[in-house]
């Protein structure tokens, strides 16, 4: 609901950072940043400084794109969300929770 409404309203802007260009949407106290890597678009919702969030998102994308098992899972015709979650969960925990 809320996310789609915010994106439909066009509340977005481009962020230019030393890591590249990102799209962002401000929704309440959250900022959502989007980054496309090859044919996968990742979104990270956060509160706080954008620079650190972008850095974490870039590290996440590098981790998944350099892992053949994960990359293969994202490109299957029938994506298995539970399997992907189980494989990327340690990466997510390390970068976004413990990081």
Image (spheres, rainbow, N blue to C red):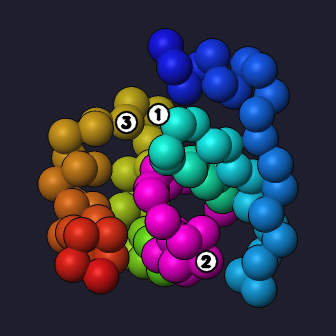
Q: Is 52 placed above or below 53 here?
A: below
User: Where's residue 67, x and y in %?
Assistant: 39, 75
Disc 1 + disc 3, Cβ < 8 Å:
yes
Tag 2 residue: 51
Question: What number is the disc on residue 89?
Answer: none
In the rendered structure, the answer to whether residue 35 lies left or right of residue 55 reads right
Around disc 3, counting alpha carbons within 10 Å, would you say few (fewer than 14), some (14 to 19), or many (20 or more)?
few
Q: Identify the element where label 2 is drawn.
A: helix
Distance CA(mark 3)–CA(mark 2):
31 Å
In the rendered structure, the answer to whether residue 52 lies left or right of residue 21 reads left
What are the residue bounds of the magenta stretch?
36-57
Query: Which residue is farthest bottom?
Result: 18
User: Where's residue 94, x and y in %?
Assistant: 24, 77
Distance CA(mark 1)–CA(mark 3):
6 Å
Q: Is 24 placed above or below 8 here?
A: below
Q: Is 80 placed above or below 57 here?
A: above
Disc 3 + disc 2, Cβ < 8 Å:
no
Residue drawn at the location 32% of the way across and 69% of the way down: 96
Tag 1 residue: 77
**Mark 1 vs mark 2: in front:** 2
Tag 3 residue: 79
Indicate whether residue 40 is drawn in magenta: yes
Indicate the quadrant where residue 87 lies.
bottom left
Around disc 2, counting alpha carbons within 10 Å, would you say few (fewer than 14), some (14 to 19), or many (20 or more)?
few
Indicate whether residue 18 is drawn in magenta: no
User: Where's residue 73, x and y in %?
Assistant: 38, 51
**Mark 1 vs mark 3: in front:** 3
């Amino acid at each position: 609901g809320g996310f789609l409404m915010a994106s439909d309203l066009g509340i977005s802007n481009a962020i230019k950072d030393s890591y590249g260009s990102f799209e962002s949407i401000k929704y309440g106290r959250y900022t959502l940043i989007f980054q496309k890597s090859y044919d996968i678009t990742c979104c990270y919702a956060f509160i706080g400084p954008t620079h650190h969030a972008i850095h974490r998102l870039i590290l996440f994308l590098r981790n998944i794109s350099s892992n053949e098992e994960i990359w293969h899972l994202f490109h299957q015709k029938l994506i298995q969300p539970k399997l992907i979650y189980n494989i990327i969960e340690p990466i997510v925990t390390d970068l976004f929770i413990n990081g």
